[in-house]
Amino acid sequence: MAQQNNENTALIQALFDIFRNHGYEGTTISLLSEVTGLQKSSLYHHFPKGKEDMLKAVVEFVSTQIQQHIIAPLLDAQVKPEKRFSNMIATIKAFYSDGRKNCLLNVLNLGDAKVEINKLQNDDYSAWLNALIQLGEEVGLSQPEANNWAERFLIIIEGALVIQRLTSNRQTFEKHMEYEQKQFQQILNS
C-alpha cells in the first residue's frame, strides 16, 4: 500500500510538472504518456476522465502541499511571527525553485481551466491570504493594513514569477523575496 501511495505521488508530481510547464491547453495525452512513461491506457486507468481528472488530482495535490507547508505553519502561534514568515519565504523559494518553475495558477488561467479547478485554486488563495492577514494583524497591522499587505505580498509572488519567466532574469524572484523579507522585518520593528 505504501509503495502504491509513493507511486501515485510520483505520478502526480510528474503530471504537476507537465501542467506547470505547458498549461492545460498545451498538455496533451501523448505528452503526458511520453513524460510519465505510461501508456495512454494506463493513464486512463488511473484517471478515467483523462486530462481533466489528472489536472484535478494535481490541483488537489498542490492544495495539500500549500495547506501543509505554507498555511498551517503560518498559523502556528507557537512559532515567532518572523520565523513563520521566514520559513514561508524559504518554502516558496523551494516550491518555485527560486522562480525557475511556473506557478500552476498562472499557467492554468491562460487556458480553459475548469470551474471546479478554479474554485480549488481560489480556496487556496483565500486561505493563504487569510493566514497572511492573521499574521499581519498579529504583528500589529490594523485589519485594513494587514489586508493590503497580504494581498500585495501574494501579487508580488505571482508578478515576480511571471516577470522572471518573461525576461529570463533569474534574479527577479529572489530579489523580490529578499525585499519582502526586509519589508516584514520593518513591520516588526515599527
Image (cartoon, rainbow, N blue to C red):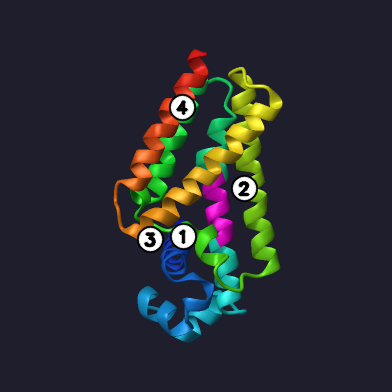
Q: Kindly identify the amino acid type of the residue bearing the numbered disc 4.
A: Gln
In this picture, residue 49 sits left or right of residue 92: right
**Label at residue 130:** none
Label 1: how many Cα within 10 Å (few below 14, some 14–19, many 20+): some
Q: Name the quadrant containing residue 136.
A: top right
Q: Residue at x 69, y 58 (%)?
A: 119
SS class, disc 1: helix
Percent across and percent down for residue 111 are 56, 72
Q: Kindly identify the amino acid type of the residue bearing the numbered disc 1.
A: Thr
Residue placed under numbered mark 3 in the picture: 166
In-front residue for pair 114/68: 114
Magenta residues (range): 59-66
Q: CA distance from mark 3 to mark 2?
A: 23 Å
Residue 87 lies, with reference to residue 92, above or below; the image says above
Q: Kindly identify the amino acid type of the residue bearing the numbered disc 2.
A: Tyr
SS class, disc 3: helix
Residue placed under numbered mark 1 in the picture: 9
In this picture, residue 132 sits left or right of residue 9: right
**N-terminal of the two: label 3 or label 4?**
3
In-front residue for pair 122/16: 122
Q: CA distance from mark 4 to mark 2?
A: 21 Å
Residue placed under numbered mark 4 in the picture: 183
Could you tell me if the residues under marks 4 and 1 are in contact, i.e. CB atoms within 8 Å? no
**N-terminal of the two: label 3 or label 1?**
1
**N-terminal of the two: label 3 or label 2?**
2
Callout in the foreground (3, 1): 3
**Label at residue 125:** 2
Q: CA distance from mark 2 to mark 1?
A: 23 Å
Q: CA distance from mark 3 to mark 1?
A: 30 Å
Q: CA distance from mark 4 to mark 1?
A: 36 Å
